[in-house]
Amino acid sequence: MDRRTFLKTSGVVGAGATAFGSMQGMLIGADSTKAAPADIAKDGGKGAPNVEKLGWRPGCQAWTYNYFTPAAGEKPKKLTFVESIDRTHDLGLHYIEAFPGQILSPEKPGEKMGPQLLAEARKEVKARLSDKGVKLVNFGVVNPANKAVFEWAKEMGLETIVSEPKFDSFDDLDKLVEEYQINIAIHDHPKPSPYWDPDVVLKYIKDHNKRIGACCDTGHWMRSGVNPVEALKKLEGHIISFHLKDLAEFGNKQAKDVPWGTGRGDIKGILTEVKRQGLKPVFSIEYETPFTMSQLAQCVAFMDQVAVELGKS
């Protein structure tokens, strides 16, 4: 199930959706940290120091961990947010983007990420992030992006809420981003979602607050038949963050995610264009098909190597 289907079935998308339901009292519970998977201990965990030298912030969209495969040939499983923090740490990365509705921890399966978290659970999340050296920077994709979401985002220290808001909500969003000093990044799910076309995104954001911009999902652009590099050029001056993907095919909604640099997404071209524009964004690795940790490590290593080349130019 992809994120768009998840959001629909969980009631997050739609005119009548409320941000989140109420919850019972909570604590995250016992530490679920485990040793890094063997393939990461061998092949990954080095992070992306050359990427960071460019002022870029590589991390993971926690949605990726819905498709975690412990080893090649094993059945994928969904990880909790706490486990997602741990695996991001294992990669040597320092940034994570949460998504609404993810189970918080194995010990507390009834507690989920979002504004419904009570005070004690919020403290526990912050402590886990601090312990692992990972910063929660973004939250998405969430609809509607209302005051309750902004309040939660402010308390959790978030920079950006990733959303696909209604076309008539931008005047209200202008006020919210100004009040809370938190960005709204418009995300592009594939056709027929309302923002699949970068021209539509640009139409609705160009005359609004500078804190309203684009979250560029490069894989979904590919699924919609949109060239990611050309889309970035159209959105110049309005780009906030990335869901960075490489796919095996172009123009196919069912295309599988592959390690960066091995597919048709021209990741090097994307990164070259980002540098040309002088951006300093968050790049969230995102898979929507099963993966192993060594594949994520391969993405990180590829990006770091490209950063070495770009750092010389």
Image: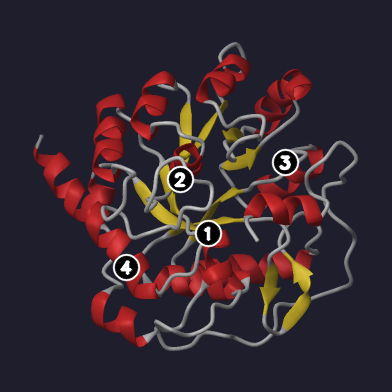
Q: CA distance from mark 2 to mark 1?
A: 10 Å
Q: Position of residue 193 (x, y in %)?
A: 66, 35
Frontmost of labels 2 and 4 is 2
Frontmost of labels 3 and 1 is 1
Mark 2 and mark 4 residues within 8 Å of each other at the beta carbon = no
Q: Which residue is mark 2?
A: 219
**Sequence-earlier tag: 3 or 1:** 3
Q: Is residue 12 left or right of residue 273?
A: right
**Sequence-earlier tag: 2 or 3:** 3
Frontmost of labels 1 and 4 is 1
Q: Which residue is mark 4?
A: 297
Frontmost of labels 2 and 3 is 2
Which of the numbered marks, if any, corresponds to residue 150? 3
State the residue in front, 184 or 69: 69
In the displayed orientation, state which residue is furthest to the top. 207
Q: Residue at x 52, y 53 (%)?
A: 254
State the residue in front, 259 or 176: 259
Residue type highlighted by circle 1 = Glu
How was this image coloured?
secondary structure
Q: CA distance from mark 3 to mark 1?
A: 27 Å
Q: Position of residue 98 (x, y in %)?
A: 60, 57
Q: CA distance from mark 3 to mark 4?
A: 33 Å
Q: Which residue is mark 1?
A: 288
